[in-house]
Amino acid sequence: MTTHTHGGGATTHPAEPAQPTAPAAAATGATAVAPPARHLRGVLIAVIALYLVAETALAPFLPQLFARLYAIDDTGATGYYLWICRIIGLAALPLWGLAARRWPAHRLVLTGLLASAACDLALGLAPTYTAFTALSAASVAANCSLLLAYPALIGEYSRHATEGQPDSDTARLAGIRAIVAVFHLASIAATATGAAVLALPEPRLGISAFALLDLLLAALLLRTLRHLPAPRPGHRAPHPAGRTAWLLLLASAALIGVAFDFAISVSRPFFTTHATELGTSTTVAAALFLLPSAAALATLPAARHCLGRYGATLLPASLAVTGAGLGVQYLADNLPVLAAGRVLFGLGLGLAQIAVELRMFRATGTAGPAFTAVETVRSAGLIAAPLAAAAAAGHDLGLPLGVAAAALLAAALLTLAFTRSRIRTTAPDPKDAHA
């Protein structure tokens, strides 16, 4: 793939007719995106939602599933299964990223959907725990290709932007905001889906049913692509002030992403238990668990205004607010304070997710292996989260919240330090003013 932007402007791919400029589009009333392009966005969003649901739906119910299907009650079987799937995912993701250097992301996503359909169909027929684990690992490897729908979606939003700056944060914001909304809605849908599969008289049918969704999305994607011109290469991030500065930007995006993902993950496993210790019921604890998602969704309409007003300071500020919400939950000794901490956490979380993703795409662009390299580092960082949560909860059930707050504070400080270093390295030399 080759970069399709030079000096802030977009070059037109030979296979496509020239797009009207923003003023021309406004003059003709053609600011809306063409229907096939809107359809492609919808299909890509559906692919990402399927990825999120498929990856997490059965995770909370694996011990019960193994007990029903294979009469295995050993909790170590669940841990081994998750470990194998995580390792395979870490190995497969960068390979899909390398493949994206040679083939369009849309084609790789289509290939992954077809491979996932075959794996999911076979998964429901797995006769033993060993076969189930092996097929699950193959399914995870195939599903990693679906992550490429994310940069492809951001590329589509950037490509059809009418502001005249297709690679700006403003152009990316709409796509990222859509994905953040999908993330929170998918987390709710995944829990309901997993419970529904386990409630079936024959859970194998529910597992194999994912193959139908894979095939449906593959058919929709193929049909949509047939009505579109040949996809143009995605945008590769430019090297600001040279390769060293770009690598620093890439490393900071990965480190900030690791700290953010670690904090969110480490705060989750023992929250409901911590809430019940403060005197609430399991139902109320579950409602409190979902409260940040509702608060995060409420912040999304204000994301564009916040980005325009606060600019680069949105990332450290939102990380600090998110960390403060976690800190309030850690110090809470009653339910009203705990609920207030959950709301504050969610309000910061929605904006922080957007700011973290904007930082990542500013570093990686939407083409080539840089995106999957950062995602691989972020996924690797998640391996430590369950271990840290368990160790902290062994001392105090609320301590994982404190650990998460500290991780987000560290991420906010890292962001400020990197921003200052960039200002120093990109600021003009005063001597040049007198040259």
Image (spheres, helix red, strand yellow):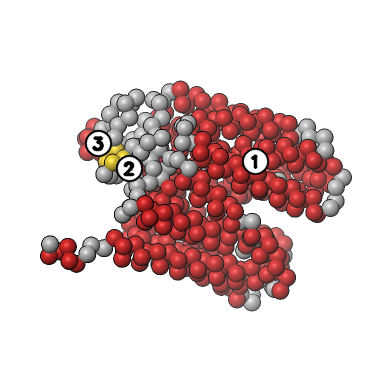
Left or right of residue 219, residue 231 in this image: left
* Residue at image point 42% right, 42% down: 366
Most distant residue in the left direction: 434
Residue type indicated by callout 1? Val
Mark 2, residue position: 166
Other residues around mark 1 within 10 Å, as few (<14) / some (14–19) / many (≥20): many
How far, Cα to Cα, is label 3 from label 1? 42 Å
Which numbered mark, 2 or 1, is in the foreground of this view?
1
Query: Quadrant location of the C terminus?
Result: bottom left
Is any atom of residue 43 visible in this view? Answer: no
Q: Give coordinates of residue 138: x percent, y percent.
A: 68, 37
Query: Where 299 sits versus 280, above or below?
Result: above
Mark 1, residue position: 140
Residue type indicated by callout 2? Pro
- Disc ID at residue 51: none
The foreground one among 311 and 262 is 262
Q: Earlier in the sequence, mark 3 or mark 2?
A: 3
Which numbered mark, 3 or 1, is in the foreground of this view?
1
Q: Give coordinates of residue 195: x percent, y percent.
A: 72, 46
- Disc ID at residue 21: 3
Q: Earlier in the sequence, mark 3 or mark 1?
A: 3
Q: Earlier in the sequence, mark 2 or mark 1?
A: 1
Which numbered mark, 3 or 2, is in the foreground of this view?
2
Q: Give coordinates of residue 136: x percent, y percent.
A: 71, 40
Q: Quadrant of residue 351?
A: bottom left
How far, Cα to Cα, is label 2 from label 1? 33 Å
